[in-house]
Amino acid sequence: MQIRPILAALRRHRLATLLIAMEIALACAVLCNACFLVVQRWKLIQINSGVDESALAVLTVNGFDPSQAADLNARMLTGLRTIPGMQSVTLINQVPFGTQAGAAGISHDPGSFKNTIGVVDFVLGGPGTYQALGLKLVEGRLPQADDYRPATNFAPPDAQVLVSRALADHAWPGESPLGKDFWCDKLHFRVMGVVDHLARAHPHDWGTQATEWTVFTPTLPGGSLAGTYLLRADPHDLPRVLHNARDAVAKIAPDVVLDQENSQTVSDLRTTYFESDRIMINLLLGVIVTLLGVTALGIVGLASFWVQQRRRQIGIRRAIGATRGDILRYFQIENFLIVSGGIVLGMALAFGLNLLLMQHYELPRLPVHYLPIGALTLWGLGQLAVLGPALRAAAVPPVVATRSV
Amino acid sequence: MFGYYLDLALRSLRRNKALTVLMVLAIALGIGASMTTLTVLHVLSGDPLPGRSDTLYYPQIDPRDDSGQMPGEEPPEQVTLIDGLNLLHAKRADRQALMTGGYVPVQSDSAVVDPFYVEARFTTADFFPMFGAPFRYGRGWNAFDDETRARDVVINGELNGRLFGGADSVGRTLRIADTRFRIVGVLDDWAPNPHFYDLNTGSFGRTEQVFVPLQTAMGLKLERHGSNDCWGKGAGGVGRIYPGESCVWLQFWVQLDSAAKVAAYEQFLVHYSQEQKALGRFVRPPNVRLRNVMQWLAHEKVVPDDVRLQTGLAFGFLLVCLVNTIGLMLAKFMRRAADLGVRRALGASKRSLFAQLLVESGVVGIVGGVGGLLLAGLGLWAVRQRPSSYAALAHLDGSMLLVTFALALGSTLVAGMLPAWRACQVPPALQLKSN
């Protein structure tokens, strides 16, 4: 099949050709970027929190005087531990996907913010919290009894801590983080170990790089570590245990108020936290599917028009010896050429759109492999859309050539 | 002539139903998606206090120490207690109010209902007249009550309904954290969106149920709810008591009725900063900002990024739909080249053919617009089912209705123009000859 006669024919239908190519180009640009956004969101939703989500719940109470913190903790721990099925009750200040309690900027130097590392989440945990969370140690050592220090401010003034691997890689790239010091203003911290994963309370708010910049700080209960409890139970038992625990608060501490919103299983918190991202993904997928549908229907419409317009010419070609396959291939190749033109333009547009998005949103550059995938999709779509009209063209009988209309 | 064109258009559209449906559907989908997202954007970027917002200003000054100072840096987004009170007492603006958010347990005097927590605002007296908060019963307190730490409280209609069944509760008692307060006013339904005067407690769909004089609340150590930003000695002052001296945690708003007063107030802020520096409280050179409500909202970027992204996406989609429609119309008009040739040969001018074809695309636009409106209604309904804070606000108003039709009709007419022009270029003789 020769391409030149096809090009010659297209030159006579410049406007229509241009329109299809433009539609393909726009579709290509939107498609590549929308798919990229979907993948980005999907990655975010799939974040590994590093904790045993299905076995954990958080229970928060407020409305107590700071001076009663120690007494309240003692009553709550004892009271909640008597609930059947409860594996452990420990103190924590925040859990992944819950309310953020302690985000603060840290730096390599004391007292100044010149040599900064970034803003991290301080996860304060009482004795047993590390084990309850189910964190995985990859380097260093676990907190011992004397590592737990009292915190009057938002963190202990001088503490041995565990950092997430993501934070260690960011703060000390290529070095062992063990024994390294860092400061939050005048509070001093030394790294004693590294955990595989530990997500911050609001991973989405801090950009894709910083979703796991967390510092697990062993802290003695009391002071600022009070009122928020980490419950652990068998995943099947957890909803009932949490329900019982919520009811028990009224008896254990009638003077405090249960914070309904912040007393949930970690799995539920996760679902709620990512709700808007899931909606965005569905929306983007909806747009992608509709866009492909509209584009395909547009191609079908124009191709049908061309077939009808060229019935006579097709008949003549058939009469002078072209096979049905020749006619079919003619329309397929024609479509392939137009779509290819559109894709070339579309790739430029896709990168332009990506640059625009990068300026306004925190979004990385569009990876190059999206382009061949987008191109293949559009080629496939074009071929699929043109098949119907092309088959109809191939079915035109040679006798049409002899008719005058 | 228009009637005749309309008749021709309808006949032509009926002749090829599949193509017509396809065009209408493409337009409807594009318009529906665009209008849904545009309405959400419109609602979120709206003026919280129309007619008032351009006289309300949010002064910012920079009391921080010199660590981490960067050139061109914005001053903090809130004020310290000392600066807030100084600026309040200076009374250089037409009205001024100092405030912060709170979270307090309330109970009616009868104590039949268990105490429950509500969002509160601790503020000085000018809050109500300055923001034009409407009262159903009673009124706000005055500056004298502020200074004497009067145990006065204003509640909103929702709380009044919950505790007093909606009756006039002025003069009755409300217990806040076990302290008796006298209700002096009940607000009508009032919830400015965005919640511009304190964006830290959520930008949309938030409203306080209880308003307490700031100094009274502080005297009683009522629980605060909001953001604080500290430096130097105050760093790490997170807890249930109030933030320290080197922390910003209050919002200060002023009303300035003329441009001259705005300029004078900005000058005053600079002088104040210089004075405080001379006293040794401030370290940095004067760094002040004075933004009105809309400038402040734009600066704080209250419209969620996702909403902008969705709007952009929807308009990209509309563009594809329009290009698609142009292509389909071209096919449709060119297919009727013979008809058009006959009309030309019978004496119709190119112009009248063009008008005839535009009427046809206009019909597609109007039908597509109606379809788009239905889809937008459906889309907004879906938005309202979402858990986001602004969900309940997503409604189509009169102006957006007009925009929908203008967009649908305008875009299809523009889309019809190119194919119509192309179809008019067909030489009539050629079409007549081939038959």
Image (cartoon, coloured by chain):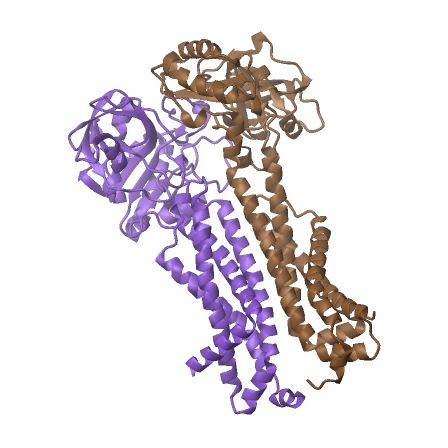
Chain colours: A brown, B purple
Q: Quadrant of residue B75?
A: top left
Disc tally is 0
Quarter residue B327 falls in: bottom right
Q: Give the residue drawn at x 79%, y 75%.
A: A5
Q: Nearer the viewer, residue A372 or A168?
A: A372
B28 vs A381, left or right, is: left
In the image, B351 versus A119, the foreground residue is B351
Q: Quadrant of the C terminus of chain B?
A: bottom right
Q: Is residue B424 above or below residue A36?
A: below
Q: Nearer the viewer, residue A61 or A82?
A: A82
Taking A73 as reference, is B254 left or right?
left
Q: Left or right of B15: which side holds B377?
A: left
- Judged left or right of residue A311, residue B148 is left
x then y, percent, for residue A97: 52, 30
As drawn, A141 above or below B168: above
User: Residue A311 placed where, x, y %?
Assistant: 71, 77
x 66%, y 14%: residue = A141
Residue pictured at 61% horizontal, 25% vertical: A50
- Residue A195 image offset from top left, x and y in percent: 64, 22
- Look at the image and tell me whether residue A295 can be seen: yes
Q: Nearer the viewer, residue B361 or A316?
A: A316
- Res B93 seen here: no
Dividing the image into 4 quarters, which one contains the N terminus of chain B? bottom left
Q: Is residue B434 above or below residue B325?
A: below
* Residue B293 x %, y %: 36, 47
Which residue ends up furthest to the left in the rendered image?
A: B171
